[in-house]
Amino acid sequence: MSTNRPFVLSIAGFDPTGGAGVLADIKTFEQHQVIGFAITTANTIQTENKFFEIEWTDLNFVIRSIETLFKSYEIKAVKIGIVPSLDYLNQILSVIKILSPTTKIVWDPVLKSTTKFEFMTITDQLELNTILSKIDLITPNYNEIEVLFPGFISEKLWLQNQIPTSVLLKGGHNPSETGTDRLFLKNEIIDLLPSKEKCFEKHGSGCVLSSAITANLALNFPLIEACKNAKNYIEKYLSSTTNLIGYHYVP
């Protein structure tokens, strides 16, 4: 296999519509000219506007898949999507860190589907912080950040250095500034403002954004530039159609 392009891995669910999960990630990786691999954490029955059912992949199977790929390829970056529990996520992260400590890791914490199907609950904040310290970036929306860190906005938790990773707070659910993403780093906040492009809601847009960031990190862009580049990509994707399924190739 060619080594001219970096290897990138998606560990996420399978969505048969291709709008979200590993299929959406692979489409995004290809457009960024990285070689995309995928390991599924779950199989789902869904359409672009309704979620019906999920079957989780046995963790041992996922771990064996990760070990096989990392022992065969130099994987520069990993995007993680839906997982059933913090322990499941933690074991995935621990294996990656042992096999390749320098690999960049992005977690898109999909806690619920857009139709309110709940994937995972957070019950142990200390455990969550320990897990997040192994991750380079998380990409929650405004609903998810309040589940992960109650009071993140109102109590300005990022100022207290209580968040052990960088956070890109997606602006799709921003109640006052729709489309403005905010990147929370250790000592600064960077606003990623929307362009004037006409955008339309898309099924799986969060998956596409996080996988675009992951691809950019694999291409050696610094985190801030990776997020800015991904912002441009997702806006083109959101503007590509007026319905819930978009086009990944936008001239």
Image (cartoon, rainbow, N blue to C red):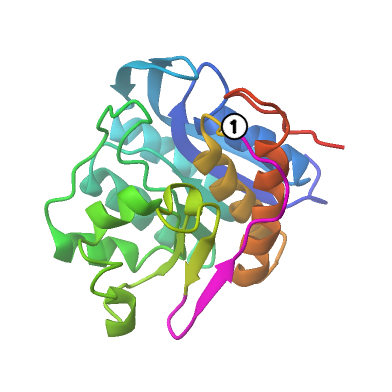
Q: Quadrant of residue 238?
A: top right
Residue 54 image point, x, y percent:
31, 20
Position of 216 relative to 17 (above/below): below
Residue for point 87% across, 37% down: 251
Residue ID for mark 1: 24
Residue 67 image point, x, y percent:
46, 44
Helix, strand or loop: magenta stretch: loop
Q: What amino acid type should be assigned to the residue bearing mark 1?
A: Ala
Q: Quadrant of residue 118?
A: top left
Residue for point 22% across, 66% down: 151
- Residue in front for this viewpoint, 43 or 231: 231
Residue 204 image point, x, y percent:
51, 33
The answer to whether residue 243 of the structure is visible from this angle is: yes
Position of 162 relative to 6 (above/below): below
Q: Is residue 199 magenta?
A: yes
Residue for point 37% across, 65% down: 134
- Residue in front for this viewpoint, 79 or 52: 52
Q: Residue furthest right?
A: 251
User: Does residue 23 appear to the left or right of 247 in the view shown?
Assistant: left
User: Does residue 221 appear to the left or right of 207 in the view shown?
Assistant: right
Position of 71 relative to 177 (above/below): above
Residue 53 image point, x, y percent:
31, 15
Q: Is residue 193 magenta?
A: yes
User: Does residue 194 appear to the left or right of 145 in the view shown?
Assistant: right
Residue for point 39% across, 70% down: 165
Q: Quadrant of residue 224?
A: bottom right
Looking at the rendering, in which quadrant would you find the N terminus?
Answer: top right
Q: Residue furthest front?
A: 176
Extent of the magenta region: 185-200
Q: Secondary structure at mark 1?
A: helix
The answer to whether residue 71 of the structure is visible from this angle is: no
User: Does residue 181 appear to the left or right of 130 in the view shown?
Assistant: right
